[in-house]
Amino acid sequence: MKDLEQKLNYTFRSPALLENALTHSSYANEHRESGALSNERLEFLGDSILGLVVAEHLYRMRPDLPEGDLTRIRAALVCEGSLVEVAHRLGLGEHLRLGKGELVGGGRERPSIQADAVEAILAAVYLDGGIGQVRKLIQTLILEQETEKAAASRDYKTTLQELVQRESGKTLSYHLIAESGPDHAKQFTMEVQLNGEPLGMGEGRSKKEAEQAAAKAAVAKLG
């Protein structure tokens, strides 16, 4: 755990909190006799703490933005994909305590498990060191990506729609071209068409994300 604490730049006064944050329900279910607890309650608390800290940061630091833009940026910062990026930077997968079934099924790389563990760690830091410590951690792990995430959160589908509506008789449609990967790590390829003709293509971890990527490619092409 020491190497993880070094990456977090935080040393737990109560190491049991960090251990709890890394314990998946599958492990807890297999080790009930030892009193192992899953990280689900910590994840619940961490989700709320993360949302509050990010929302307050955006409110204070981005007075120029309306509520809709703030909401999109916050969503990009706290979404599963963003938290999985954090987990990868921390090398969190190797520290997770998983049950045998999850281990065999690739649980260490499962996005939902990694994202939940990040939120659980935030809650553990909060309980162990207070709001100041968890603010510092969120600033380092997540808020320093704000500019990048703000750009990524742009609604390219709306932008594209506005571009093509400048002329009448223009119709956009999105089509699934391909999907690949295991159930826990699907990759989708979507194509946006203008009046039935290909205009842009994009990939993503969800159909909506792939649609945004396709729209982004189309906007760049038209621009």
Image: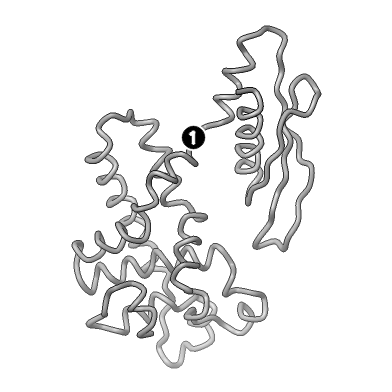
> Which quadrant does the N terminus fall into?
bottom left
Task: Please report the residue visible at 64 percent of the width from the left and 23 percent of the height from the top.
Answer: 222
Residue 46 sits above or below residue 145 on the image: below
- Measured as percent of width and height from the top left, residue 152 is found at 49, 41
Query: Foreground residue, 127 or 147?
Result: 147
> Which quadrant does the C terminus fall into?
top right
Task: Please report the residue visible at 68 percent of the width from the left and 56 percent of the height from the top.
Answer: 186
Which quadrant of the view contains residue 14?
A: bottom left
The residue identified by callout 1 is 154
**Residue 14 horizontal side relative to residue 171, left or right:** left
Disc 1 residue crowd, few under 14, some 14–19, many 20+, Cα 10 Å: some
Task: Please report the residue visible at 46 percent of the width from the left and 59 percent of the height from the top.
Answer: 83
Query: Foreground residue, 116 or 171?
Result: 171
Amino acid found under the numbered disc labelled 1: Arg
- Measured as percent of width and height from the top left, residue 64 is found at 28, 29
Residue 6 sits above or below residue 83 on the image: below
Task: Please report the residue visible at 42 percent of the width from the left and 85 percent of the height from the top.
Answer: 36
Residue 148 sits above or below residue 162 on the image: below
Residue at the outermost top position: 168
- Measured as percent of width and height from the top left, residue 37 is found at 41, 80
- Measured as percent of width and height from the top left, residue 121 is found at 36, 70
